Image (cartoon, helix red, strand yellow):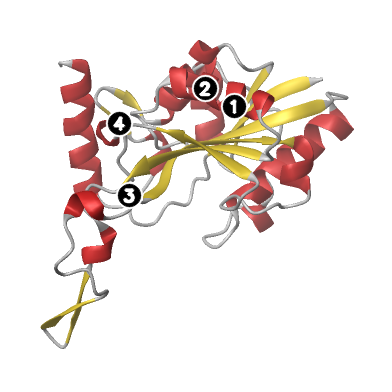
């Protein structure tokens, strides 16, 4: 029974063209995810799921495997990322006779990812009766004090104006690094964000979602700060 990493990396990124293989601090951004997966020692197979031949070639050179090309119907702008994991499990089991026990979805654009948290995720999945173990991080500012802007006017979303910050409950969001899960949990499409999942808390200094050019620049700043380069 195998543990697999699945790194989705389609070729059609719109906001940042060729995002999944764009150079980040000197090397393709996907290389950081592949390296963290390899360093963790958790996986029998590290699979890059892509519809793009150039990405497949780069991923293979970086030490991942690309045993299939992802079909177009799960490579569109609105495709659900878990469908790539389901497809990978199905392909490996049916065509390569590899029996999957657990899978870890690892995002291709997570250059701050650290293998220690991937290991922690597997340990938590094994020790707890849960379907998923997901990397999360805390919000930097109390979300109870969120503001909205409508017609160039500010309004407060909730009624915590006078509450002290230390009295407010801390909230978290998906770090967009990884999600461990059992094979059945992925195949049956269990809800990631529910009581069936356990968190792996990642420091905020290791998390930056990358959707825009500004995000990219800030992520490079964080990477250099964390690695003193």
Left or right of 153? Residue 11 is right
Cβ–Cβ below 8 Å for labels 1 and 2? Answer: yes
- The answer to which of marks 2 and 3 sits earlier in the sequence is 2
> For the point 66% across and 30% down, which residue is it?
128
Q: Is residue 103 above or below residue 148?
A: above
Where disc 4 sits, the SS reads helix
Residue 154: where, in percent of width, then height? Answer: 13, 80
Give percent across and percent down for residue 42: 61, 16
Q: Earlier in the sequence, mark 3 or mark 4?
A: 3
Cβ atoms at labels 2 and 3 below 8 Å apart: no
CA separation in Å, label 4 and label 2: 15 Å
Asked if the residue under mark 4 is in contact with the one under mark 1, i.e. CB atoms within 8 Å, the reply is: no
**Which residue is tagged 4?**
206
- In this rendering, the label closer to the viewer, 4 or 2: 2
Mark 1 crowdedness (10 Å alpha carbons): few <14, some 14-19, many ≥20: many
Q: Position of residue 119 (x, y in %)?
A: 53, 19
Query: Tag 1's secondary structure?
Result: helix
Q: Give me the C-alpha separation between circle 1 and circle 2.
A: 6 Å
Discs 2/3, front = 3
Residue labelled with disc 3 = 170
Q: Earlier in the sequence, mark 1 or mark 4?
A: 1
Which residue carries the number 2 mark?
120
């Amino acid at each position: 029974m195998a543990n697999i990493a699945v790194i989705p990396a389609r070729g059609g990124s719109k906001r940042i063209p060729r995002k999944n293989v764009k150079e980040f601090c000197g090397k393709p951004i996907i290389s950081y995810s592949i390296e963290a997966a390899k360093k963790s020692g958790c996986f029998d197979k590290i699979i890059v799921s892509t519809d793009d031949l150039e990405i497949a070639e780069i991923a293979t050179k970086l030490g991942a495997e690309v045993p299939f090309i992802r079909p177009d119907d799960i490579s569109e702008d609105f495709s659900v990322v878990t469908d790539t994991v389901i497809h990978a499990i199905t392909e490996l089991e049916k065509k390569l006779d590899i029996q999957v026990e657990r899978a870890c979805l690892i995002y291709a654009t997570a250059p701050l990812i650290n293998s220690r948290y991937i290991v922690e995720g597997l340990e938590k999945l094994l020790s707890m009766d849960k379907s998923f173990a997901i990397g999360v991080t805390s919000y930097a500012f109390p979300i109870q004090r969120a503001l909205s802007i409508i017609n160039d006017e500010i309004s407060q979303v909730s009624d915590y104006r006078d509450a002290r910050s230390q009295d407010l409950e801390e909230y978290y969001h998906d770090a967009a690094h990884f999600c461990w899960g059992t094979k059945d949990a992925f195949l049956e499409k269990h809800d990631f964000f529910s009581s069936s999942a356990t968190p792996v808390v990642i420091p905020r200094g290791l998390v930056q979602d990358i959707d825009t050019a500004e995000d990219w620049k800030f992520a490079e700043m964080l990477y250099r700060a964390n690695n003193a380069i």
